[in-house]
Amino acid sequence: MRRAAPRTLESALAHLRNDLAPATTLARVQECWGRAVGPAIAAEARPTAEREGVLEVTCEAAVWAQELDLMAIELIPRLNAALGEQAITRLRCRTG
């Protein structure tokens, strides 16, 4: 009988992180937000709630909320690709 090779520390930690991470859609979006939308948007807006596929994004300024509303058609597919499923159907942007 052969023994399986030991896992790398990186692999073990990734597995542990996945087990400990909250399984909510919002938590998963928050984890991939910066990679999906880019650093400029991530610096000005953050996902704050999700319900039935509608992602609420809180922006630093009204101009950013308006811009993200216009960019939703591009951002939603990028977020869903990062999530690996079609979890987000709409963005609701507000200032906060």
Image (cartoon, rainbow, N blue to C red):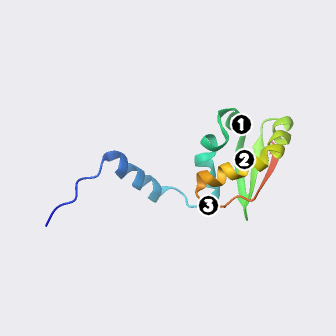
Specify whether 7 is left or right of 15.
Answer: left
Relative to 65, say whether 89 is above or below. below
Q: How crowded is mark 3: few (under 14 residues within 10 Å), some or many (20 or more)?
A: few
Callout 3 amino acid: Glu
Q: Which of 74 and 35 is in front in this view?
A: 74
Q: Label 1 near label 2: C-beta < 8 Å?
A: yes
The residue labelled by disc 3 is 85
Q: In the image, residue 25 lies at what x, y percent?
A: 63, 59
Image location of residue 4, percent across then percent down: 22, 59
Considering only order in the chain, which callout, 1 or 2, is on the residue closer to the N terminus?
1
Q: Residue at x 62, y 40 (%)?
A: 34
Residue under pointer 1: 41
SS at badge 1: helix
Q: Which of marks 1 and 3 is nearer the N terminus?
A: 1
Q: Nearer the viewer, residue 86 or 6?
A: 86
Alpha carbon separation for disc pair 2 and 1: 10 Å
Which image quarter: residue 89? bottom right
Along the horizontal axis of the image, is 89 left or right of 1?
A: right
Q: Which amino acid does label 2 sit on?
A: Leu
Q: Distance between the residues labelled 1 and 3?
A: 22 Å
Q: Name the residue under label 2.
A: 75
